[in-house]
Image (cartoon, rainbow, N blue to C red):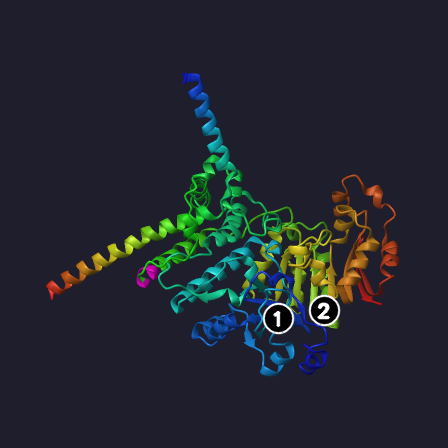
Amino acid sequence: MPRPGRSVLLAAVLLLATAQEILAYTDPGSGILLLQILGATAVGCLFYVRRIFDWLGGRRKAKRE
Amino acid sequence: MTSASLHDCGLPAGAAVPEGRSFRDPDGSLVQAGGRILRCVAKAAAARLRIFLASPAAQDLFEAGKLIPTWELPEREQEALGRTWSFEEGRPAEAAWFEHEKVPFPSYPYEWSPGMLHSAARLTLDLSSRLHPAGLGLKDATPYNVLFRGPSPVFIDLLSIERRQPGDAVWRPYAQFASTFLLPLAINRRYGLAIQGLLLVNRDGIDPEQAWRLLSPGARLRAPFLGLVTIPELLRRAGAVRESHYSARSTGNPERASFVLEFFYRRLRRQVGKLEPNARTESTWTGYMGNLSYGREEFEAKEKFVAEVLARQTPRRVLDVGCNTGAFSLMAAREGAEVVAIDSDEAVIDRLWRTASAQKLNILPLVTNLARPTPRMGWRNAECGSFLDRASGRFDLVLMLAVIHHMMVSERIPIGEIMALASDLTTEAVVVEYVDPADPMFRAIARGRGHLHAGFNPDVFRSCSERWFKVERTLEISPTRRLFHLRKK
């Protein structure tokens, strides 16, 4: 296939892909939900970090006693 | 349901009519009967509601005035209303009946000032975080779950309270809370757009996509819009959300989920705190009382006249039209009246709401222009009543002080029409301030169109009023202003 043809095909594919993205329905609030899920995952990790610190703190206290 | 049995329960025959606004919830429907607010609840939801009503969490919330008092109807009344009440196909086949304390004057989010919307947001969040330790949560977080008793918000939708999945670390109604509370408050604070304009046509609030178009590139990168608009909108555009994200998922560790939710509530409380509307927002009308177009003595004469009307009539329900910062609403509330105060200016309504809240006075201030009152809204225009649906014949005294010239000049409403409406609103009396076309304020708002009102004078006003009212008393407070106490014929 000559180069210009490939470019036209590529452009058509991109155009169709973009048009589909614009027309596809997505819940307007979905991004907020996803951001909250990501935040909940990050804070969930913090929960375990805090547990490790609590455990280390408990060990140090036990040693001192 | 038979008429005789309804009558036995003190409910007028045929008076039980569904409240249109509640049909969306498959767990129950709201019904008005004989001036009472009843809720027909499906069997399973009724069982959950009974458990909640008996819980210490509910008792605390009732005592704190955060939840509308609710009780199950006695057996006899339930039988009379019918256990198989059904409005339409798909309604609960087996049901129980509960009653809510009636809120004197229902109002809607698009009639609230920014401070009122903010206080409703705080109530919703506070309620959700207080329910959390009891293993409960909210199904939804919309301002339509809140009404105002005087200046105080109260949560009314008890069917929104549900048992939370212990391992779920996500507050499911957050997107709704952001769209209906946080974004309108943030946009109001940043750009000064009125809450009424934002929420009247956007029942579900402002979503990140709408807000994105409104924001400048710089604002998109700053708090609170970065987290409320920009990142969510980019995630949405990237198509990163899957259907599975919508269903509650257990982390398998309730302790961890609880830690995450408490962290989230703390952060959200801080965010809501930062969105508190500015109490000193200025508008054309906020300085009106300090810049009257007539003297202090005239204003004192007006105060004395209104005080005498209040003392003589002792009204129970007062409507203050064009209330400004509420000098006369405050007088009426201090005399024991339940006051609804309306003005088209959001800033003055916000100030009055703050004063009434601080002084614990029974005043409900609403952003409403009587010349273009709040319309009926929602499905079949029947979900939320218009202002006039709620206000007609409800008040025994209507105050129309320094307002009729605005309606006549700015809105081009004939004086006869204004007095006809006043007659619809009041059951007993109205106090009107007549403002002559020669008055400086009349001339200022007429902007050169004074000739349109050249024939307007006290005699014309009196003859227009006498179709519905008889003059009880008049007082000239200045050469161009006269007060009329009119009693309904």
Q: Residue furthest front?
A: A1
Q: Give B190 or B483, whichever is nearer the viewer.
A: B190
Q: Which of the chains bears the disc numbered 2?
A: B
Q: Which of the chains bears the disc numbered 1?
A: B
C-beta proximity under 8 Å, tags 1 and 2: no
**Residue B151 visible, this angle:** no
Is residue B195 shown above or below B18?
A: above
Q: Return the residue at label 1.
A: B102
Q: Give B30 or A26, whichever is nearer the viewer.
A: A26
Q: Return the residue at label 2.
A: B310
Residue in the picture at 46% in, 25% down: A11
Residue B342: percent from left, percent from top: 67, 57
Residue B222: percent from left, percent from top: 43, 41
Dot 2, how many residues are within 10 Å of its Cα: few (below 14), some (14-19), or many (20+)? some
Which quadrant does the C terminus of chain B fall into? Answer: bottom right
The range drawn in magenta is B254-259
Q: Secondary structure at mark 2?
A: helix
Residue B333, quarter of picture = bottom right
Are the residues under badges 1 and 2 in a single subunit?
yes
Of labels 1 and 2, earlier in sequence is 1
**Residue B68 visible, this angle:** yes
Dot 1, how many residues are within 10 Å of its Cα: few (below 14), some (14-19), or many (20+)? some
Residue in the picture at 21% in, 60% down: A54
Q: Secondary structure at mark 1?
A: loop
Q: Give A32 or B271, whichever is nearer the viewer.
A: A32
Instruction: Identify which amino acid the numbered label 1 is placed on.
Output: Lys
User: Which is in the foreground here, disc 1 or disc 2?
Assistant: 1
Which quadrant does the N terminus of chain B fall into? Answer: bottom right
How far, Cα to Cα, is label 1 from label 2?
26 Å
